[in-house]
Image (cartoon, coloured by chain):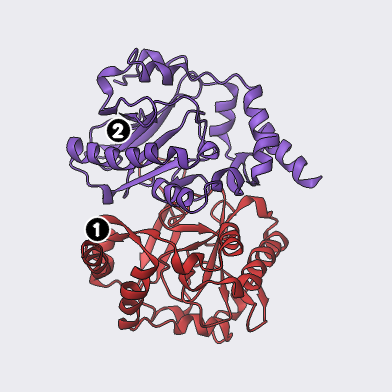
Chain colours: A purple, B red
Amino acid sequence: MLMVPKSRLGNPGLKIQYLLRVRHCCSKSPTDVKTTVVYPATEKHLQKYLHRDLRLVRETGDDYKNITLPHLESQSLSIQWVYNILDRKAEADRIVFENPDPSDGFVLIPDLKWNQQQLDDLYLIAICHRRDIKSLRDLTPEHLPLLRNILQEGQEAILQRYQVAGDRLRVYLHYLPSYYHLHVHFTALGFEAPGAGVERAHLLAEVIENLEQDPEHYGRRTLTFALRADDPLLALLQEAQRS
Amino acid sequence: MLMVPKSRLGNPGLKIQYLLRVRHCCSKSPTDVKTTVVYPATEKHLQKYLHRDLRLVRETGDDYKNITLPHLESQSLSIQWVYNILDRKAEADRIVFENPDPSDGFVLIPDLKWNQQQLDDLYLIAICHRRDIKSLRDLTPEHLPLLRNILQEGQEAILQRYQVAGDRLRVYLHYLPSYYHLHVHFTALGFEAPGAGVERAHLLAEVIENLEQDPEHYGRRTLTFALRADDPLLALLQEAQRS
């Protein structure tokens, strides 16, 4: 049986990966098959899973300000489900650790893709309490205490709860993220987690070091990411880069 | 039948992934199964494939100079098979593109993990002609013409030969690399290639930008990578970081 918190069901883009135990007709031993459930699935999801036709794009700091940010703001992307977790209106029993500081605190919660039955594919998410950081692009040295808390306290909490030490974890942000409220991924190092590739993941330790060296790093630097060939943002960025 | 160039057979650590077409006893249609052959397999290989017990380590610039580099130099790692390719003594018929410039040139060759039968898992390697660049750690602005050539001419050659455009390619270096002669990976963007994770891959476009912004970036910055728990280098780095 697959348990999904009710509060997430309205969230378009909900993805759950779980292990399905199957037995082949001519085999005595069962096999585990990793399966992804998307609910509710829109036309966009069907496209995404039927055919992964991707394009790499390089976004300068100006591209972000002039194209990506206005494009984001034109879409009404609800993150009410994130606020429900932060306000303990939903999934309060799933919280593994919380630093309640409104500025430098965060909530640590298992990702829905992890069934918590084994540590091989351990996957947790730290969601910051502050509501004014959309993504990596907004980060400045002002956020260093928050980022250091997430790295250090997140690793300690995972060691306490799951006996998995910090050097067995990959701790990173996505750019582009799948929702625009700052969050950090913690995955088992031996698990080739989807989205842990170099074209999407940014190690938190390196993000911290980049901000220490150059306060404007993430406002200014060119960032690389993949978009589906039919994503409207891709056409917008390509058009701007041609002109 | 699996064809492996003779010149590679002496190279410890040769890995070949290929598709095996299998037909299940109770199914009419065959299935392709991706298989890895390691030949010759040492005890170290057996350990690696039996159990991937990994640890993340952060190597400062000083750690590299004081620990990693002396450790590398203490091992006699032969890269004669690389020189044989560069000198066209082996695999000359496999070369897709060459810029023969001794300082800023390179050879582009399909990786042995790619069987060249389909583009989904396209995988090529650019190997530079210069023999004095061991890895990312040695790169300085002096190497920018070479790196720009690899990025631009490598993408053009792949477009010409395979009709795959540059924005459908992930172009990156490994750190740590599997052999210490500078080379660059070109893989299909939709293919989750082993070693394309954020803890090992460095996008060439970002490497170029890092060197443009700070000439000493790769000599000085802390780099993160995973080692097997029983790798002697791990113990050496951990010991240095404790003291």
Q: Chain of mark 2?
A: A
What quarter of the picture does the C terminus of chain A occupy? top right
Splitting the image into 4 quarters, where does residue B62 fall?
Answer: bottom left
Task: Point out which mark residue A22 bears.
Answer: 2
Residue A78 percent coordinates (x, y): 52, 18
Q: Hey, what amino acid is under mark 1?
A: Leu
Query: Which residue is more in the foreground, A218 or B200?
Result: A218
User: Circle 1 is placed at which residue position?
Assistant: B50
Tell whether A113 sits left or right of A97: right
Q: Is residue A102 above or below residue B228?
A: above
Splitting the image into 4 quarters, where does residue B68 fall?
Answer: bottom left
Q: Chain of mark 1?
A: B
Task: Give me the C-alpha separation between circle 2 and circle 1.
Answer: 24 Å
Task: Point out which mark residue A65 bears.
Answer: none
Q: Hey, what amino acid is under mark 2?
A: Val
**Tag 1, which secondary structure?**
helix
Say yes or no: labels 2 and 1 on the same chain: no
Query: Which residue is more in the foreground, B35 or A87?
Result: A87
Give the residue displayed 56% in from the left and 27% down from the top.
Answer: A46
Circles 2 and 1: CB atoms closer than 8 Å = no
What quarter of the picture does the N terminus of chain A occupy? top left
**Tag 2, which secondary structure?**
strand
Residue A88 percent coordinates (x, y): 32, 15
Query: Does any portion of residue B28 appear in the rendered image?
Result: no
